Amino acid sequence: MKENLDLGFKAVQIDTDSRLHFAAAAVSVGFELAEGTPKVSNCYDTEHKYEPEQPGDVRMYLPLLAHGININEFVTIWKDPEAALNEAENLPGRIQTATDPQTLQNLIFSFDALYMGAAVAYMRLLSLGRVSPPDYLPPSDEETRAITALDYFSREALENEGMRSAGGRKKIAAELAKHWQPAMFAWLKAYRANLLELRNLWKDAPESIRINRGNGLPPLVLEKGPHFKQLLERWT
C-alpha cells in the first residue's frame, strides 16, 4: 500500500531540526508535551550562539508512554520508515489469510501499532521531502471518514463475522485498501499543522545558557536572570 503516496527518491539535505519534526509526529499520534517538565527549553551555548530572535538548542519533552505505546517504538520507525511501511503493506494479505483464531487474534492485536507506525513513517518521509504532500486544506470528508474507519478497524472490521469466510475477508481487505490513502493524507495534514504550531513554541520558552566547565564536570545551565546578557556575550 505504500505506493499510493507517490514515493520519490531525490537528494535530501541534512535535516537540521529533526527533533522538531519528530515531536510534531509524536504529538500527531497522541503524545503530548510532558507534564512536570519544561515542555520546551531554549538553551544557548558555544555551539548555539545567541542571535536576536533566533533559537538556540531547542528541546521538546515528550512522555515515554501514551495510549499504551512506548515512544521508543516511534523512534525506531523514525530511523527506518521503510521497514514500517513494508510491514503495513502486508496487512491486506494477512487479513485474507487469517483463517484460524490465533492468526486472527495476532492480526487484531498488532493492527493499531502497524497502522500508527505507517502514519509516523510517512511523516518521516515527508520531513525528508520523499513523498508528495497533500494540500494544506483541512481534511476532506473522505479523509475524515477514512480516519474514523481505520481508528476502529481492528474492533469493528477484524472482529466482524465477515472474517469467517474467504469472501468476507477479501471484502474487508478491500475496505482497508480503500481507506488507507485518504487516512494517510489526513495524518500528514495533522502532522504539518502540528509542525507549524510547535515551530514557534521556543519563543515562549525561558531562555537559558549552558556553560561548559570542562575537567569532566557537568555543564552549568542558568536560566535568564541578572547579568544574563553579559553571560551570553561571554559564553556564546
Image: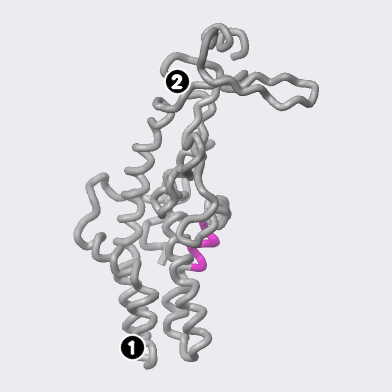
Magenta stretch secondary structure, dominant: helix
Vertical comparison of 15 with 171: above or below? above
Q: Residue 218 at x, y = what percent?
A: 71, 27
The quarter of the image holding the N terminus is bottom left
| Disc 2 target residue | 54
Neighbor class of circle 2 (other Cα within 10 Å; few <14, some 14-19, many 20+) is few
* Secondary structure type for disc 2: loop
Is 169 on the left or on the right of 85, as rendered?
left
Q: Which mark is residue 162?
A: 1
Amino acid type shown at disc 2: Gln
Q: Residue 206 at x, y = what percent?
A: 47, 24
Q: In the depicted view, which residue is nearer to us: 91 or 233?
A: 233
Q: Residue 233 at x, y = what percent?
A: 57, 8
- Farthest residue toward the left? 141
**Spatial CA span between label 2 and label 1:** 57 Å
Neighbor class of circle 1 (other Cα within 10 Å; few <14, some 14-19, many 20+) is some
Q: Which region shows up in magenta? A: 81-87
- Farthest residue toward the front? 36
Q: Earlier in the sequence, mark 2 or mark 1?
A: 2
Is 224 on the left or on the right of 180, as rendered?
right
Q: Residue 102 carries which label?
A: none
